[in-house]
């Protein structure tokens, strides 16, 4: 298939060629050029931000009735859903996602998130406040005025998405931001911007000019210019904790709103009384779901001492049966890492784990086949401890670090002894204990016995895993400001 060209950016309702031309996008499964993406300038980022500002301050979008905004977003979601078959190959080629994952968890989920978040536009943004008696101190008591609390859009929102799921993640930001009356500037990840460009093309086609803008580029200065823009009121970012800290500092210097969904080193607690077969299958997800390039991946495996050897031995044996290769091939469950640089980073972490004294139970190297592509074997470290770098740092690859625990208290202590706190997993047939343990984990979400995540639940993390929450109705807190208006009760 010939490379695709996505060498345009969207500013104020117009698609135009980027000032600096384009740059190549590499297919991580083949190392061939999958397409070309727009290489815009910092000046164009400023133009896009100003266009979004004009659309917010002068355009109809923030002043539309919520029902009208919701209707337009539902229409956009349906239009995008109709294009999913045509965008499937593109999504696989730039992300390396397995075909089923690309279809369901990238493309279809993006449409669903726009549609679901449209309902936020239908919510009442006004909460009345009745008159109350107020203690006026030395002046005595008085009757407080009536009033109302309004939720208003923040303004211009910069939506910056990561390479592992650039499309659905972008939709999870753009959907609530637009539904609540904000305007947006989208910046996709440099490694996988093409499907996001197509997404923006479809969504923009039903919106007033300037409500949605799209910029892209291969260098960090594009994102820096967007975060620094005086026309941007809020930054919604998903990515590494290191980059998130820099963005948070820049936002803090400007007193700018931010939503940070960052890294993770999630603990997966397996008790001896669990359904070990189910726990084993689910524990393989860092290998079989995006090759571990998922912030919520359960990469820290904590297993009760009495079953530790048996459980980890079975896990290592299962790894040998996992087929690695072409994301489109039937039966393949382990795809490539996003880039040569990411694979090299995983290799450095594996080398560090060996130097620290952990034992490789399986994997630890590039597979013999395929010869091309950024593949890495499913890897399991045993005889590790929680102080090792492989247990503390986010590797973002198909690497699991297994650590034994003696009892419930030690399991909780090990799980919480982390700089991260995004997700957690607990396996036990004792439901009361599982919930008791879950309540004590310092993490934004906990899934018990394989319970799937809910789209209407709050999503975000503790500690280095981020600041703020979105998801379902909780997004209203992230993408709106509160205003109180009071008046005398006799008015």
Image (cartoon, rainbow, N blue to C red):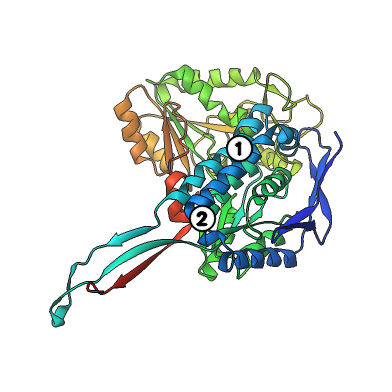
Image quadrant in which the C terminus is located: bottom left
Q: Quadrant of residue 76?
A: top right
Residue 144 place in picture, x, y as percent: 21, 72
What percent of the width, then of the height, locates residue 369? 78, 24
Residue position marked by numbered label 2 in the rendering: 259
Instruction: Please report the residue visible at 74 percent of the width from the left and 39 percent of the height from the top.
Output: 94
Q: Nearer the viewer, residue 339 or 404?
A: 339
Q: Residue furthest bottom?
A: 139
Q: CA distance from mark 2 to mark 1?
A: 33 Å
Q: Tag 1's secondary structure?
A: helix
**Residue 432 place in picture, x, y as percent:** 29, 28
Residue ID at (68%, 29%): 98
State whether residue 143 is above or below residue 79: below
Secondary element at image label 2: strand
Q: Crowding at label 2, few (<14), some or many (≥20) Cα neighbours within 10 Å?
A: many
Q: Are marks 2 and 1 in contact (CB under 8 Å)?
A: no
Residue 257 shown left or right of residue 395 in the figure? left
User: On the image, which quarter does residue 236 sit in?
Assistant: bottom right
Q: Between residue 356 and residue 471, name the one nearer to us.
A: 471
Q: Does the rendering let one see residue 51?
A: yes
Q: Is residue 474 left or right of residue 294?
A: left
**Which quadrant, please, contains the N terminus?**
top right
- Residue 388 in sight: no
Residue at 41% x, 50% y: name it. 123
Q: Nearer the viewer, residue 370 or 40?
A: 40
Classify 3 as above or below 381. Answer: below
Q: Which mark is residue 353?
A: 1
- Front disc: 2 or 1: 2
Which residue is the extreme one toward the right? Answer: 2
Tag of residue 442:
none
Q: Earlier in the sequence, mark 2 or mark 1?
A: 2
Residue 374 picture location, percent across and down: 75, 35
């Amino acid at each position: 298939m010939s490379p695709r060209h996505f060498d345009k950016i969207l500013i104020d309702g117009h698609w135009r060629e980027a000032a600096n031309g384009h740059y190549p996008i590499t297919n991580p499964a083949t190392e061939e050029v999958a397409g070309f993406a727009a290489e815009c300038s910092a000046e164009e980022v400023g133009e896009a931000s100003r266009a979004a500002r004009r659309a917010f301050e002068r355009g109809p979008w923030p002043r539309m009735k919520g029902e009208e905004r919701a209707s337009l977003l539902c229409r956009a979601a349906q239009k995008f859903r109709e294009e999913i078959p045509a965008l499937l190959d593109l999504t696989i080629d730039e992300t390396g996602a397995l075909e089923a994952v690309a279809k369901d968890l990238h493309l279809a989920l993006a449409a669903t998130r726009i549609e679901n978040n449209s309902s936020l536009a239908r919510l009442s943004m006004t909460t009345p406040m009745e008159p109350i008696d107020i203690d006026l101190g030395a002046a005595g008591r008085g009757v407080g005025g009536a009033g109302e609390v309004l939720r208003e859009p923040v303004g211009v929102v910069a939506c910056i998405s990561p390479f592992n799921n650039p499309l659905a993640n972008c939709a999870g930001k753009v959907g609530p931001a637009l539904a609540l009356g904000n305007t947006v500037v989208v910046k996709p990840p440099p490694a996988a911007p093409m499907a996001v460009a197509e997404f923006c093309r479809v969504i923009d086609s039903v919106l007033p000019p300037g409500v949605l803008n799209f910029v892209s580029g291969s260098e960090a200065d594009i994102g820096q210019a967007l975060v620094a823009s005086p026309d941007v009121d809020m930054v919604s970012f998903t990515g590494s904790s290191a980059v998130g800290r820099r963005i948070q500092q820049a936002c803090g210097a400007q007193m700018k709103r931010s939503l940070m969904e960052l890294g993770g080193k999630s603990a997966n607690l397996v008790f001896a009384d669990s359904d070990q077969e189910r726990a084993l299958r689910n524990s393989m997800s860092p290998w079989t779901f995006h090759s571990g390039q998922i912030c919520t991946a359960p990469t820290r495996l904590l297993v009760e001492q009495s079953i530790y050897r048996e459980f980890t031995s079975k896990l290592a044996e299962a790894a040998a049966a996992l087929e690695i290769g072409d994301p489109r091939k039937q039966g393949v469950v382990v795809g490539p890492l996003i880039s040569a640089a990411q694979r090299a980073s995983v290799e450095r972490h594996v080398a560090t784990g060996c130097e620290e004294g952990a034992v490789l139970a399986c994997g630890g190297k590039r597979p013999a086949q395929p010869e091309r592509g950024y593949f890495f074997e499913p890897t399991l470290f045993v005889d590790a401890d929680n102080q090792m770098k492989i247990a503390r740092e986010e590797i973002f690859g198909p690497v699991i670090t297994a650590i034994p625990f003696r009892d419930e208290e030690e399991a909780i202590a090990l799980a919480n002894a982390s700089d991260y706190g995004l997700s957690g997993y607990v396996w036990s047939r004792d439901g009361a204990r599982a919930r008791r343990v879950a309540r004590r984990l310092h993490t934004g979400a906990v899934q018990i016995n394989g319970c799937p995540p809910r789209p209407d639940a709050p999503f975000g993390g503790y500690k280095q895993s981020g600041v703020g929450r979105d998801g379902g109705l909780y997004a209203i807190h992230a993408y709106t400001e509160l205003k109180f208006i009071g008046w005398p009760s006799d008015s």
